[in-house]
Image (cartoon, rainbow, N blue to C red):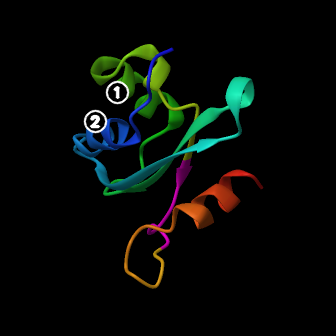
Amino acid sequence: MDRIELGEIEAALLSHADIAEVAVVVVGKEMTARLAAFVVTKNHALSLIDIKQYCSSKLPRYMIVDKVYFLDSLPQNRNGKTDRLKLLELAEK
């Protein structure tokens, strides 16, 4: 089984000229697991298709995100780091 490196997906997405911040989480488990990207854009003209196409030029197929959520900013925990638990909550709604 191929290993998914969330940091590698995030780095690939951050290399896009219109993406300011990004966090990727795995939603679900085993066969129902999906990759969700939370994106803060510099230009709000991006779409899910734009991001999938960009990912496909940088990453293997199994690392292409399934869903994209556009946010004004990434939630932070009290330590100033991205609050991935909050992101999971947003993705599961």
* Residue 2 image position (x, y, % from top left): 45, 17
* Residue 41 image position (x, y, % from top left): 37, 55
* Residue 51 image position (x, y, % from top left): 42, 33
Tell me, yes or no, whether the highlighted magenta stretch contains residue 72: yes
Element under disc 2? helix
Left or right: 15 in relation to 74? left
Tell me, yes or no, whether the highlighted magenta stretch contains residue 87: no
Specify which label sits upstream in the sequence, 2 or 1: 2
**Residue 54's disc number:** 1
Residue at 38%, 34% in the rendered image: 5
Kind of residue at disc 1: Tyr
Q: Is 27 or 13 nearer to us in this picture? A: 27
Q: Can you say whether 57 is above or below 42 in the image?
A: above
Q: Is 11 or 30 nearer to us in this picture? A: 30
Residue at 33%, 22% in the rendered image: 59
Tell me if label 2 and label 1 are in contact, CB under 8 Å: yes
Chief secondary structure of the magenta span?
A: loop
Q: Quadrant of the C terminus?
A: bottom right
Question: Real-space Cα distance between discs 2 and 1?
Answer: 9 Å
Q: Quadrant of residue 87?
A: bottom right
Residues shaded magenta: 69-75
Q: Which marked residue is nearer to the observer: mark 2 or mark 1? A: 2
* Residue 85 image position (x, y, % from top left): 60, 63
Q: Quadrant of residue 46?
A: top left
Task: Residue at the far front: name it.
Answer: 1
Residue at 44%, 69% in the rendered image: 73
Left or right: 61 in relation to 32? left
- Tell me the residue that label 2 is attached to: 12
